[in-house]
Structures are given as structure tokens and as C-alpha cells.
Image (cartoon, grey):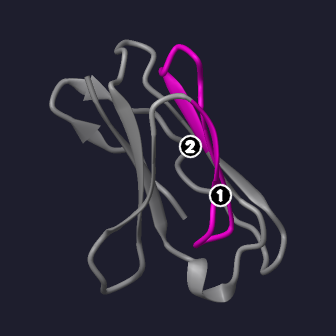
Amino acid sequence: FFSAVTLGRAQVVQEPSAETTQGIGINITCSHPKIDADFTRWYRQIRDQRPELVATGVRGTKTLQDPPGRLSVGADRRSSALWLAQPRRGDAALYYCAVRD
């Protein structure tokens, strides 16, 4: 479902995988404790397609329309969570966060 990504020297840590069933919400977390990110971006890549930007955040919580859910970025900007409220079959993908310090 998702994977860790490293950009430049910024080490991003995610769980290796997560699963849910259609309609059951899932929380995907990302941390990068060694850097202070300017912003956090979440991408998803559906099989055989290019990655697409799902959400961008600096800090705080914002609601997402597609896919329905929310993005929460910690006050220290060193962690974030992507909550998919009601995943649909078409939301099955590789989800990953990327940060820029």
C-alpha cells in the first residue's frame, strides 16, 4: 500500500505496508525526525500509472476531497499522517510522503 522514500539527504520513514477493506478508514503515517521540513507532500501511484499528488501541507490539519480524508502535519513538521476516510477500490495504490528541508 505504501513505501518509504528518500529525497536527497532527508530520511523519510514509513511502515512497509498497510491494508484495509473498501469503506474502512486507514491512517498512513510518515516521519522524518532528523530534518525540519518546509512542507510535506503525499503522493500515490496506482499500478502502471504515474505518481499523482494527493496533498501538500506545512502544519496542522486539512480536509481532502479526493480521496476523501485529511492530512495532518505535526507542529514541529517532522511527522504527518494521511487519513483515508472511506477508501474505494480505485484508491488501492502505493502511497508515499516526500519532504524538502
- Label 2 Cα crowd, 10 Å radius (few <14 / some 14-19 / many 20+): few
Residue 73 picture location, percent across and down: 57, 32
Boundaries of the magenta span: 60-81
Q: Amino acid at mark 2?
A: Glu
Q: Amino acid at mark 1?
A: Ala
- Label 1 Cα crowd, 10 Å radius (few <14 / some 14-19 / many 20+): few
Report the side of 15 relative to 78 (left or right).
Answer: right
User: Which residue is labeled 1 in the image?
Assistant: 18
Q: Considering depth in this image, is 51 or 14 the residue closer to the camera?
A: 51
Element type at mark 1: loop
CB contact under 8 Å: marks 2 and 1 = yes
Q: Considering depth in this image, is 97 or 37 the residue closer to the camera?
A: 37
Report the side of 37 relative to 23 (left or right).
Answer: left
Residue 74 picture location, percent across and down: 59, 24
User: Which residue is labeled 2 in the image?
Assistant: 15
Element type at mark 2: loop
Residue 62 among those drawn in magenta? yes
Residue 51 among those drawn in magenta? no
Res 34 quadrant in image: top left
| Residue at 69% over, 83% down | 88
